[in-house]
Image: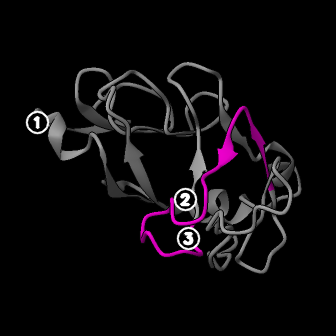
Amino acid sequence: MANVNADQIVFFDFNDASDADTAFDSSGNGYNGIMFNAEYTAPGGGVTGAATDRAMDLGAFNNGAFLDLNDVALEGAFDSMVDNDQATIAFWLYGNDEQPVSQWTFYFGPDRQLGSHAPWGDGTVYFDVAGCCGANQRINKNIADSSLYSGQWNHFAYVKDEGYTAI
């Protein structure tokens, strides 16, 4: 297997709301995503609260909102993750007042190649790799106190480095 450099692939800061259906890639790679049933927050609605900072608002629970990166994947954007068996996915997430609820945070398929719940309805943050839900495929951490993630921003980072996984 060739060792492929795993530089930053995509970065969404959600600050360019010029097209309501497009999440513009700020990495310089041009891998824009398509927003379904989601919208940009008003200026100041992002993690910093700065006047120029926005975020993607997924709306009410279970409305089917998501950021579609299928075309980006078909262009080969994520090939280095597969070739190196390495990836880090990091993001800021605002937990609405309904937390915890059962939802996917991200999902690379088929068969849960990488998947996350942050958190699931039981208050547990899950990270699945190469399927689910065996001891070598899933790690998790329960956060029993929902006030730690409801109504505020939290940073999550998921790391997959061959046989090592971390949240």
Q: Is mark 3 on a helix, strand or loop?
A: loop
Q: Where is residue 58 in the image (x, y as percent from the top left)?
A: 58, 37
Task: Tell me: 84 left or right of 48.
Answer: right
Q: Do the residues labelled 3 and 1 touch (CB within 8 Å)?
A: no
Report the magenta stretch's main SS: loop
Would you place residue 61 above or below residue 51 in this image? Answer: above
* Distance from Cα at disc 3 to Cα at disc 1: 28 Å
Q: Which mark is residue 145?
A: 1
Q: Where is residue 74 in the image (x, y as percent from the top left)?
A: 87, 49
Q: Nearer the viewer, mark 3 or mark 1?
A: 3
* Distance from Cα at disc 2 to Cα at disc 3: 33 Å
Q: What element carries label 2?
A: loop
Would you place residue 158 above or below residue 111 in this image? Answer: below
98 or 117: nearer the viewer: 98
Q: Which residue is drawn at 61% across and 56% down?
A: 42
Q: Mark 3 points at which residue?
A: 53
Q: Mark 2 points at which residue?
A: 85
**Over which residues does the magenta segment extend?**
33-53
Would you place residue 111 above or below residue 2 in this image? Answer: above
Inspect this view and state whether residue 149 appears.
yes
Single out the residue that lies furthest toward the left.
145
- Specify the amino acid type for callout 2: Asp
- Specify the amino acid type for callout 1: Asp
